[in-house]
Image (tube, rainbow, N blue to C red):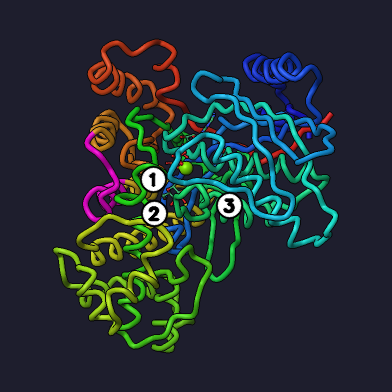
């Protein structure tokens, strides 16, 4: 692929001067640093999630798409007789210092999730890629290639548009290429999803799917259950062109550091909700491929199987699991470990060994009711959103308002039931709605990060003006022009991962 294939905003136009300059800077920076040109550059983009928040790890469908910011990794394979090694630098070395480390020939590279370091994300990519090669092509004489690397990422880190997945997907792609393997998208996805967890965040597969499979101009309807599948969904026409605006809160939530109280705790709560609901309804869950092995979608399936309703429309099925969660998970105040163990008829140490030992969590009470209700209701909203998009080629005012309402309800649920919003994000959404968006919500993991807004093209200027005046200048009076320029962007659904050689 050429850079024009990746970045041109439509089939006919070329690459913008900014893109060309960044590209040239990466190649000349590499050449200056290592004394020769790179062999190739791998690239993977960030993503914005339109709807379906915090339900990918419960294996429900989500609707993200790639954005145009990305992680570029320039690589040269270098000869080495001894231990294979990696030399890695960042175009921003003050913030992300240069590192050098060796790569074991036959075992997984060590990653310490307790020590949060930018190179952990590259190591995740190496780990996934080499594990894949060893398993797929067993060869006792295989030695990983030694490489020199320069990375340039312009996805805001911790900003809710998944710099981490862009980084890990691009790293894995680079390491596979350096070891002479042209990987398929599906294989890259499978290994990238699992390998990113090595940094200590038990994320689902949405970010990697969007980073790898997106196509310019389409949203990516992504299914995880029973198997992974994607569908490229066009954004329909409407009287006023539908636009997605992405606005940063500039509240950074580092997921790896806060995982025990935030992200990973939610993963644990959803898993516990699934096994408790299964127990209460007397259904046995087979293991699934969610990170802890038992997902709410899996419970849903077995519950429907028991009732003989697997042939029902999915919407009706989801309504029934919402009902079950409402009636059966009654404790608004949450459940202690003792209470959950009692419901499952196991001991507390057994509970901890089975469900709470993969990663540390810090919680006295697990809010099973709220988390399950968010998940099931959000899953229903995704189905409704997709159905509405697919209904006609042209959306009328009524449809558009309905889509906006689903986005607003998603935000409300993230705020109240899932507790993954924050005051700044709530503020941005309220300001944007007053200025004319159809729907506004957080996107990504939340607790800060990013927001996404659906609005008519004609309202873009008014919304940007309102957010500047009522949020950015108010909260950050000294905000630089450069930072402001990155605060809000019109998101154009863009292409997924690419390898650029020559
Ligand atoms: P979210 O997962 O909410 O969408 P995110 O992926 O941007 O947001 P994290 O999952 O916390 O946030 O990952 C951010 C981490 O990724 C950073 O702390 C840093 O270690 C690494 N990272 C991202 N971009 C770069 C970059 N350009 N250079 C070096 N490290 C980066
Ligand atoms: C992060 C994770 C994703 C997903 C979102 C929330 O971005 O990496 O897998 O769970 O949070 O929807
Ligand atoms: Mg991330």
Disc 2 residue: CB within 8 Å of ligand 2: yes
Mark 3 nearby-residue class (10 Å; few <14, some 14–19, many ≥20): many
Disc 1 residue: CB within 8 Å of ligand 2: yes
Q: Residue at x 81, y 30 (%)?
A: 39
Marks 1 and 3, Cα distance to the nearest angstrom?
A: 18 Å
Marks 2 and 1, Cα distance to the nearest angstrom?
A: 7 Å
Whether residues under marks 2 and 1 lie with C-beta atoms below 8 angstroms apart, the answer is yes
Residue position for label 3: 195
Q: Is residue 418 left or right of residue 480?
A: left
Q: Residue at x 51, y 41 (%)?
A: 237
Residue position for label 2: 54
Q: Quadrant of the N terminus?
A: top right
* Residue 96 numbered tag: none
Indicate the position of residue 125 as horizontal and vertical percent values: 63, 45
Of the image marks 3 and 2, the number of the one nearer the N terminus = 2
Of the image marks 2 and 1, the number of the one nearer the N terminus = 2
* Residue 445 numbered tag: 1
Q: Nearer the viewer, mark 3 or mark 2?
A: 3
Q: Which residues are magenta?
A: 408-423
Which secondary structure lies at badge 1?
loop
Query: Is 408 situated above or below 139?
Result: above
Is residue 384 in sight in this rendering? yes
């Amino acid at each position: 692929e050429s850079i024009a294939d990746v970045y041109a905003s439509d089939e006919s136009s070329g690459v913008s001067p900014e893109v060309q300059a960044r590209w040239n800077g990466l190649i000349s920076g590499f050449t200056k640093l290592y004394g020769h040109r790179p062999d190739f550059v791998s690239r993977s983009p960030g993503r914005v999630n339109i709807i379906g928040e915090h339900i990918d790890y419960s294996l429900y469908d989500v609707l993200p798409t790639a954005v145009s910011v990305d992680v570029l990794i320039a690589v040269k394979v270098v000869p080495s007789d001894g231990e294979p090694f990696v030399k890695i630098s960042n175009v921003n070395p003050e913030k992300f210092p240069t590192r050098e480390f060796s790569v074991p020939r036959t075992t997984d590279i060590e990653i310490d999730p307790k020590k949060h370091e930018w190179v952990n994300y590259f190591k995740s990519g190496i780990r996934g890629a080499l594990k894949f090669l060893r398993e797929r092509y067993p060869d006792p004489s295989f030695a990983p290639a030694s490489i020199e690397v320069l990375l340039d990422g312009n996805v805001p880190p911790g900003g809710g548009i998944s710099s981490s997945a862009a980084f890990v997907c691009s790293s894995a792609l680079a390491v596979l290429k350096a070891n002479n393997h042209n990987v398929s998208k599906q294989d890259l996805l499978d290994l990238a999803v699992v390998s990113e967890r090595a940094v200590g965040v038990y994320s689902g597969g949405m970010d990697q799917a969007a980073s790898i499979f997106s196509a310019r101009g389409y949203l990516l309807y992504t299914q995880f259950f029973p198997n992974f599948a994607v569908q490229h969904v066009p954004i329909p026409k409407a009287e006023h062109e539908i636009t997605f605006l992405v606005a940063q809160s500039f509240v950074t939530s580092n997921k790896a550091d806060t995982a025990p109280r935030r992200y990973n705790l939610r993963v644990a709560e959803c898993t516990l909700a699934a096994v408790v609901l299964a127990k209460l309804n007397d259904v046995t869950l087979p293991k699934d491929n969610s990170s802890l092995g038992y997902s709410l979608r899996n419970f849903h399936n077995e519950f429907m199987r028991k009732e003989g309703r697997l042939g029902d429309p999915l919407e009706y099925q989801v309504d029934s699991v919402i009902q079950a969660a409402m009636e059966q998970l009654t404790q608004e105040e949450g459940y202690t470990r003792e209470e959950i163990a009692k419901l499952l008829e196991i001991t507390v140490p057994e509970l901890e060994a089975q469900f709470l030992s993969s990663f540390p969590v810090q919680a006295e009470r697990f809010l099973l009711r709220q988390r399950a209700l968010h998940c099931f209701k959000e899953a229903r909203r995704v189905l409704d959103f997709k159905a509405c998009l697919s209904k006609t080629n042209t959306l009328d005012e009524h449809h558009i308002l309905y889509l906006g309402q689903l986005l607003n309800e998603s935000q409300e649920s993230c705020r109240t039931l899932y507790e993954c919003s924050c005051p700044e994000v709530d503020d941005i959404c309220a300001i944007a709605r007053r200025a004319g968006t159809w729907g506004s919500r957080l996107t990504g993991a939340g607790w800060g990060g990013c927001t996404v807004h659906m609005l008519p093209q004609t309202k873009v200027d008014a919304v940007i003006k309102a957010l500047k005046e009522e949020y950015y200048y108010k909260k950050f009076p000294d905000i630089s022009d450069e930072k402001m320029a990155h605060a809000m962007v019109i998101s154009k659904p863009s292409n997924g991962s690419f390898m650029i050689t020559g």
